[in-house]
Image (cartoon, rainbow, N blue to C red):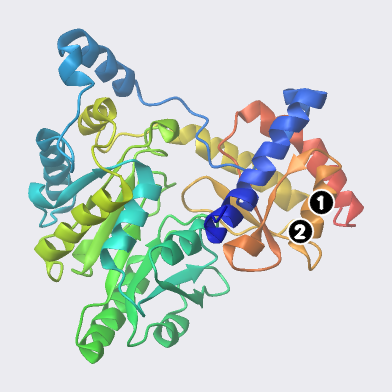
Amino acid sequence: MSINRIMRHLGEERSVIREIFEYGNARKKEIGADKVFDFSLGNPSVAPPPEVNAEIARLIAEMPSVQLHGYTSAAGAPEVRAAVADYLKTKFGAPMSTERVYMTCGAAASLTIALTAMSEAGDEFVVVTPCFPEYRVFIEQAGGKVVTAKAAADFHLDLAALERAVGIHTKAVILNSPNNPTGVVYGRAELKVLAALLQKKSDERGAPVYLIADEPYRELTYGAEVPFLPNLYPHTVLCYSFSKSLSLAGERIGYIAVPDGCADADGLFAAVCGAGRSLGYVCAPALFQRVAAKCLGKSGDIAAYRENRDLLWNALRAYGFACVPPEGAFYLFVKSPEPSAKAFCERAKKYELLLVPSDSFGVEGYVRISYCVAKPTIERSLPAFAQLAKEYGLI
């Protein structure tokens, strides 16, 4: 029997993050969940804001079940799309139309739809490394080629590297801020330089170089400004998810928004609709479309993430580990005390510490620690981190 070898490979070899997560599930069954310190998955640990459950209850009580749970339009319920467009216009002063908002099944659907809508034979997509590992999967499935531009030493943008990476075949650059895995938030000054660079490259190319803003962590910051990219560069396509901000990771709800000033906005949005159709991503979950529309701009308890961040950050630095200062999201990016991050993660398993090596993120020598866990998990893990540090002679 003939089957797709690429799909089989993807199914047999899950992402490193998922492999560690499943290892952790098995280990918890063996020795108890309280003895395993799983920092693998970016799965929100704080409750959704109260408005979420209140809106679910209201909709169930007031809206006819057949309508509530029935199909919406393929691109989403009109009133939901209008709410998203109005929010973006009001919050950011962005030129945004209801007719170019497409509701999706979360960030993965937003990205795969946008990439499929854009990609033609020979197109390249630039990603800033370290980056979310599935970018490569999404780009290659859409028929594009991945081109990497390594971030600067502090994990902010290396504009010289980006200038080298963006060429005549570049269709888009993907930008993720606040960043997974580093927690870095790109500043307004560096983004203005990037916007000027992309405009120059667009002029040289004779066609727009799009910017894909992957923004599931937009609201999760600790005081840093997150500039609204369409206001800095018009040819920006927003790919948003409510998974992190509203703690709705399992409900799979998000959107794509094509601003009015984007090149060939109508044609691009038509391609978004066509890509959603071809991929089977039509009519995002109807109940949670409506819930999201009433909770725009809300977030879970960011203070709890800040507390986790500070607790873990201060402890690891006291133990001698070097960490990237996290300005947003809920990840610590920690320098491995040995050249191989994979070897370091394997050694950490001796202490039931489950960390993600940076290799699949596109750089070597770091580990990602997802601190969106219950605070007691972090507290119980600190002696294990201290033992690990002693093993490396850090303390």
Instruction: Please identify the quarter of the rendering in which residue 299 is found.
Output: top left
SS at circle 1: helix
Q: Give the numbered dot on residue 5.
A: none
Left or right of residue 85: residue 196: right
Residue shown at 34%/84% (left/top)?
169
Task: Please state which of residues 27 and 367 is positioned toward the viewer in this rendering.
Answer: 27
360 in relation to 263, above or below: above
Q: Provide residue 377's location: percent of width, then percent of height.
A: 68, 30
Instruction: Please identify the quarter of the rendering in which residue 359 is found.
Output: bottom right
Left or right of residue 74: residue 378: right
Residue type, mark 1 in image: Glu
195 in relation to 117, above or below: below
Instruction: Please identify the quarter of the rendering in which residue 334 is found.
Output: bottom right
Q: Give the numbered dot on residue 342.
A: 2
45 in relation to 135, above or below: above
User: Marks 1 and 2: in contact by CB < 8 Å?
Assistant: yes
Residue 245 in view of the camera: yes
Residue shown at 79%/68% (left/top)?
339
Residue type, mark 2 in image: Lys
SS at circle 2: helix
Q: Provide residue 40's location: percent of width, then percent of height.
A: 63, 43
Q: Which residue is mark 1?
A: 346
